[in-house]
C-alpha cells in the first residue's frame, strides 16, 4: 500500500491499568526514567529522546481532552470511565509523519500515545461492516502499563496518534486537569502536500476528454458523487484531488453530493470536523455546491446519542432552514430539486425512509411554479421505489410523491430521479414515466449481499483506479439527454438520445 499523505485528522474490552499497575508504573518511571512502550512502537514511532529543533516552525495543534475518558490498552478504542475517572483522552486521531513532534510539559502528569497504522481490515471494503469509530487505521497495540511517560516525542513513521493522560499521583481528574494539560501539550506537524497518484492519471485524462466531447452550448456539467462515508485512513483525499484534476481539464458548472458524508457514529463535534474538511475540499473546485442529506448525516447510526434533527442537519450541511430546496440554472432552463428522504425519529424501519407530507406538498407547489420551458432534474438520497431499496419494503409517502412527479411529467419535462444510498448502480426506465437512476458509493466498498436484483456492484481495490467511483453528469437541456461519465469503477451510462 502506498505511503499515506492524506490531510490530517483533528479526528470493547476495557483493559485499562488497575490502581495496582498504576502504582507499579509510577515506581518504574521514578526508578528508571521514561519507559518506552515496546520495541516495535519505539522503532516505528521514534524514541524517547527527541531532537525537536526541526519542528520549531511546524503548525501546532492542541488536543481537546475529556476528563474521565481513556483509550483501551487492548482494543485502542475510546472508552468512558464512569466510576473512577483517572484519565484524560482525546477522541481524535492525529495524523503524523516522520519528523513531526508531540510536545508535553505538564508537570505532575504522564501520557501515552496510542498508534494506528495504514493497514485496513478488508471487511470494511468487502462486507457490510462499519468501524465503530469511523477509523480504518489499525491499532498497533503499543499501549501498556509501563508506557507512561513525560517529555517530547518525535515521530519516525507515518500513521495516527491518539492521546491519553493521567496524573502522576493516580488521583481522579476533572476540569482543572483538562485545562492545565491542554495548556502544556501540542502536536507540531509539518504540512505534507498531497502526492499525485500515478494510477489515476489516465482516468483523469480520459474522463475529461469524454466530458469535453459531450460539452456544448446546451449542456450543464456537474461533478456528481454520493456516499463517501469519510473515515480515518480512507480515500477521500484521493477523491477530492481527482475531482479537482478533472475539473481543471474540463470545468464543472457545479457539484452535487447525494449525501452520507460520514457514517454518523462519532461524537457530534467530530462529525462536524469531518464534514468541514470535506466541504473545504469541495469548495476548492470553485463552483456552487448542492448537497443532499443522507440517512447517516443525521448522526444517528448504531444508536449514536448525539443525533441531529432535520433542522439541525439543514443548518449544518445545507445552510438552509428546510432540508429540501431547489436551484435554477436559468441560462439552460433547468430546475434541480434536492429532496429530503430520511427521518430517524420515525418509529420503525419502513417509516424512517421516505418523504414528509409537507415536503410532498412543497414539491407539488414548486413544480407548479416552474416555468413552462424549464426541464427538471430531481436529486435525492433514498430511492423513490422500494424495489430499488434493500432495507425496507416501502418508502414512506412515496406513492404521493410519485403521483406529484408523474402529474408534472405529463409533457415529458422530468429528466430523471437520481439517488444514492444503495451503494450500487441501477437504472429503472420502465416502472415510471421518467428514469430512476442509482449511483454507486464513492466510498471504496464492494459488498454484494445487501443489494436488490438488477443492481450492479463493481469490484474495488486500494491503489487501483477502481478505488474511486463517482460521475461527471452532463445534462443536455435541449435534447433531455443525460450522460453519466464514470470516474473509476463502473461504466458510463446514457439516458435519452440526441434529437
Image (tube, helix red, strand yellow):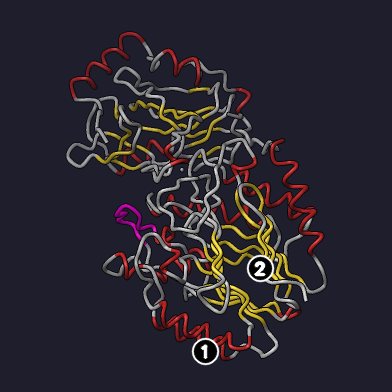
Q: Residue 477, position in %: x, y?
A: 72, 76
Residue beneath the point at 26% across and 68% down: 347
Q: Is residue 365 left or right of residue 499?
A: left
- Mark pair 2, 1: CA separation: 27 Å
**Dot 2 or dot 1, earlier in sequence:** 1
Q: Residue 81, position in %: x, y?
A: 23, 39
Residue beneath the point at 31% across and 17% down: 146
**What segment is highlighted magenta in the picture?**
299-307
Between disc 2 and disc 1, the foreground one is 2
Nearest the eye: 94 or 30: 94
Does residue 496 sit above or below 70 in this rendering? below
Q: In this view, does 192 lie to the left or right of 115?
A: right
Picture quadrant where residue 393 is located: bottom left
Residue beneath the point at 62% across and 60% down: 224
Mark 2 — residue?
Answer: 495
Q: Residue 13, position in %: x, y?
A: 25, 33
Mark 1 — residue?
Answer: 365
Amino acid at each position: 500500500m502506498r505511503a499515506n499523505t492524506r490531510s490530517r485528522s483533528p479526528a470493547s474490552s476495557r483493559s485499562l491499568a488497575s490502581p495496582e499497575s498504576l502504582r507499579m508504573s509510577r515506581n518504574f518511571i521514578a526508578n528508571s526514567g521514561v519507559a518506552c512502550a515496546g520495541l516495535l512502537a519505539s522503532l516505528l514511532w521514534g524514541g524517547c529522546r527527541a531532537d525537536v529543533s526541526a519542528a520549531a516552525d511546524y503548525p501546532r495543534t492542541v488536543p481537546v481532552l475529556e476528563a474521565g475518558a481513556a483509550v483501551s490498552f487492548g482494543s485502542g478504542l475510546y472508552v468512558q470511565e464512569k466510576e473512577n475517572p483517572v484519565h484524560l483522552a482525546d477522541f481524535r486521531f492525529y495524523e503524523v509523519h516522520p519528523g513531526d513532534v508531540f510536545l508535553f510539559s505538564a508537570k505532575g502528569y504522564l501520557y501515552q500515545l496510542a498508534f494506528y497504522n495504514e493497514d485496513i481490515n478488508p471487511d470494511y471494503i468487502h462486507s457490510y461492516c462499519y468501524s465503530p469509530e469511523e477509523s480504518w487505521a489499525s491499532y498497533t497495540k503499543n499501549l501498556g502499563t509501563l508506557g507512561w511517560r513525560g517529555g517530547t516525542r518525535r515521530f519516525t513513521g507515518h500513521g495516527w496518534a491518539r492521546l491519553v493522560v493521567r496524573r502522576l499521583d493516580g488521583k481522579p481528574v476533572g476540569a482543572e486537569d483538562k485545562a492545565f494539560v491542554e495548556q502544556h501539550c501540542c502536536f507540531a506537524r509539518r504540512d505534507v502536500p498531497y502526492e499525485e497518484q500515478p494510477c489515476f492519471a489516465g482516468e483523469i485524462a480520459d474522463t475529461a476528454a469524454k466530458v469535453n466531447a459531450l460539452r456544448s452550448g446546451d449542456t450543464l456539467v456537474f461533478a456528481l458523487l454520493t456516499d463517501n462515508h469519510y473515515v480515518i485512513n480512507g480515500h477521500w483525499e484521493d477523491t477530492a484531488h481527482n475531482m479537482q484534476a478533472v475539473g481543471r481539464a474540463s470545468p464543472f458548472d457545479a457539484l452535487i453530493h447525494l449525501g452520507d458524508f460520514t457514517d454518523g457514529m462519532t461524537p457530534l463535534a467530530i462529525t462536524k470536523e469531518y464534514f468541514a474538511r470535506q466541504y473545504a475540499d469541495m469548495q476548492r473546485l470553485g463552483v456552487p455546491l448542492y448537497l443532499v442529506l443522507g440517512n447517516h448525516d443525521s448522526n444517528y447510526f448504531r444508536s449514536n446519542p448525539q443525533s441531529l434533527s432535520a433542522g439541525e442537519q439543514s443548518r449544518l450541511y445545507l445552510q438552509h432552514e428546510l432540508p429540501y430546496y431547489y436551484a435554477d440554472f436559468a441560462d439552460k432552463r433547468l430546475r434541480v430539486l434536492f429532496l429530503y428522504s430520511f427521518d430517524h425519529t420515525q418509529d420503525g424501519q419502513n417509516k424512517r425512509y421516505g418523504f414528509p407530507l409537507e415536503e410532498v406538498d412543497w414539491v407539488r407547489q414548486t413544480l407548479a411554479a416552474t416555468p413552462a420551458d424549464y426541464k427538471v432534474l430531481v436529486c435525492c438520497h433514498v430511492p423513490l421505489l422500494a424495489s430499488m431499496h434493500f432495507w425496507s419494503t416501502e418508502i414512506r409517502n412515496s406513492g404521493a410523491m410519485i403521483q406529484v412527479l408523474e402529474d408534472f411529467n405529463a409533457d415529458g419535462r422530468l429528466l430523471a430521479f437520481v439517488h444514492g444510498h444503495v451503494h450500487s448502480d441501477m437504472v429503472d426506465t420502465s416502472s415510471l414515466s421518467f428514469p430512476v437512476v442509482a449511483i454507486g458509493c464513492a466510498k471504496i466498498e464492494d459488498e454484494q449481499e445487501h443489494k436488490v436484483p438488477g443492481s450492479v456492484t463493481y469490484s474495488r481495490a486500494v491503489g487501483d483506479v477502481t478505488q474511486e467511483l463517482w460521475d461527471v453528469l452532463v445534462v443536455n437541456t435541449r435534447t433531455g439527454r443525460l450522460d453519466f461519465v464514470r470516474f473509476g469503477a463502473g461504466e458510463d451510462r446514457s439516458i435519452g438520445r440526441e434529437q
